[in-house]
Amino acid sequence: MIKPSNLVTVIIATYNRADKLPDAIESVLNQTYQFVQILVIDDGSTDNTVEILKKYPSIEYHYKENGGQASARNVGFKYAKGSIIATLDSDDIWYPDFLTRSVEKLESENLDFVFTNWDQQTIDGKVIDFLMNDDALIPYNNRVKNDWINLESDELRALYIDTCPAPSSSVIMRKSSIISGWDERIHIGDDWCLYLETILSKEARVAYTLDRLWLKRLDEINVYDGRKRSEILEFLYIADLEIKIEKFKDVLRKNELRIFQKRYMLSLVELAKHNLLREFEFAHAIKLLRRSFKLDIAYTFRAMPIIFMKSFRTKILDKLKTNRS
């Protein structure tokens, strides 16, 4: 049973999205769950964001110098009055029942956080059901009860060490379950790092639904979707993974640490291949390989054919798709 005291603070971090921000705001205002505090944190926008916000006097607006989405979310957290925290990306849209259904589940079972499925826009303008075919979730999807699937601590550790199935707009989280906020050193996936910190520090309890309760839009300035593969490797799977390994080294189990290390080395090898064959930067490719060799020489040598075969298979599949079309 939802009580009026269960205030949800919605943090909308934004940067130069005056064209899409109103849609995000309206989607919060149109929620069937009305016990919300809406915070818009402007991360140094140079467009007319501040003018747009004048149309919404009930919304708290805070401007800061540009420092990235993690720093903007931390500013929002500082002003948060709710016992539940939600972060909506300024280019995304919640459907009307997103908060009602999420809060009901979170509060009824005293969970740490919940996340929901979504409609994902694609580059060609289509919309797809994102989580239904997510390989990482398939082992759990047959456990649906009353539209939700519960995950226990060991399952969460395995899942979130492997991947992050919950982008920021899909999650509402108990404020007391947020330990140190969003790590401002992280380039991509500060939300992933936040969830990991909770999951690795306690016997966390989480649930998700395959019902699509929001829309993820796509544009050229998405922190993740708007980047090239080489940038994803450089930032998410190399630079950010280095931070995670150091940050969580004392709470990671031996096998979990090894998973991180293998992903790190595979990413170094793949980025080295990219620099060698695409950018013709031989010296930089060698530097990347040396970083991997320093961690594990034998595994680095094993990773090389894995990466080259993966690239070969991708090219073959792309060629087959082109021929079919």
Image (spheres, helix red, strand yellow):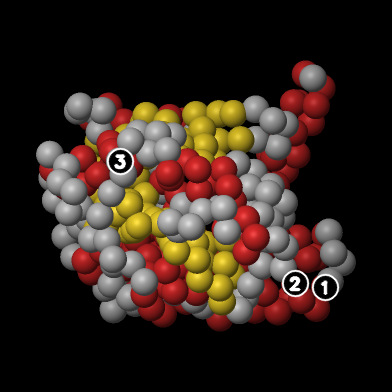
Q: CA distance from mark 3 to mark 1?
A: 56 Å
Q: Is residue 61 above or below residue 171?
A: below
Instruction: From the top left corner, tell me how far across and down residue 56 is, in percent.
Output: 51, 54
Does the CB distance between marks 3 and 1 fall below 8 Å?
A: no
Q: Residues within 10 Å of mark 2 (few under 14, many from 20)?
A: many
Q: Given the image, on which type of amino acid does mark 3 rest?
A: Tyr
Residue at x 75% of width, y 72% of height: 285
From the image, which quarter does the N terminus lie in?
A: top left
* Mark 1: secondary structure: helix
Residue at x 43% of width, y 44% of height: 29
Q: Nearer the viewer, residue 226 or 277?
A: 226
Instruction: From the top left corner, tell me how far across and down residue 171 is, in percent.
Output: 37, 49
* Mark 2: secondary structure: helix
Which residue is the site of mark 2? 285
Q: Given the image, on which type of amino acid does mark 1 rest?
A: Phe
Residue 325 placement, left or right of 66: right
Does the CB distance between marks 2 and 1 fall below 8 Å?
A: yes
Which residue is the site of mark 3? 33
Q: Return the disc, 2 or 3, that comes first in the chain's sequence.
A: 3
From the image, which quarter does the C terminus lie in?
A: top right
Instruction: From the top left corner, tell me how far across and down residue 145 is, in percent.
Output: 19, 28
> Which numbered disc covers residue 282?
1
